[in-house]
Amino acid sequence: MTAPEHVIVPWRKSAHGDAGGRVEVALATAPGTDGVERDTIRLVRDSKNPELGVLRFTARSWAALINGIKNH
């Protein structure tokens, strides 16, 4: 079982999207590969249904996602 992440920057709503659907993003730390060192991750959730869960992105995967969106 992995330890939970610790949110270090509170949830922020996206500036884009309509009133019916936006995402929220937070910056958090999660246990590193050695179980002690902590890695910075980005968390994404549905602002209207946060109980549905969270997507977790490493810095590398977050950069790839943003680049993919910009180049689409």
Image (cartoon, rainbow, N blue to C red):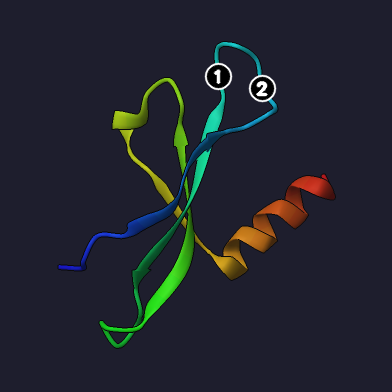
* Residue in the image at 29% along x and 30% along y: 51
Query: Callout 2, which amino acid?
Result: Gly
Q: Which residue reaches farthest bottom? A: 34
In the displayed structure, 43 sits above or below 35; it is above
Where's the N terminus, which quadrant? bottom left
Determine which residue is flagged by label 1: 21
The mark found on residue 17 in the picture is 2
In this picture, residue 72 sits left or right of residue 28: right
In the displayed structure, 60 sits above or below 47; it is below
Classify mark 1: residues with Cα within 10 Å, few (<14), some (14-19) or many (20+): few
Query: Callout 1, which amino acid?
Result: Gly
In this picture, residue 37 sits left or right of residue 4: right
* Residue in the image at 65% along x and 15% along y: 18
- Quick check: marks 1 and 2 in contact, CB under 8 Å? yes
Where's the C terminus, which quadrant? top right
Which x, y percent locates residue 28? 42, 58
Which x, y percent locates residue 67? 76, 56
In the displayed structure, 71 sits above or below 64; it is above
Residue 45 sits in quarter:
top left
Q: Which residue reaches farthest top? A: 19
Q: Which residue reaches farthest right? A: 71
**What is the distance, in whole Å, between disc 1 and disc 2 at their CAs?**
6 Å
Q: Nearer the viewer, residue 9 or 39?
A: 9
Q: Which residue reaches farthest left? A: 1
Describe the element under mark 1 as helix, strand or loop: loop
Classify mark 2: residues with Cα within 10 Å, few (<14), some (14-19) or many (20+): few
Q: Nearer the viewer, residue 67 or 36?
A: 36
* Residue in the image at 53% along x and 36% along y: 12
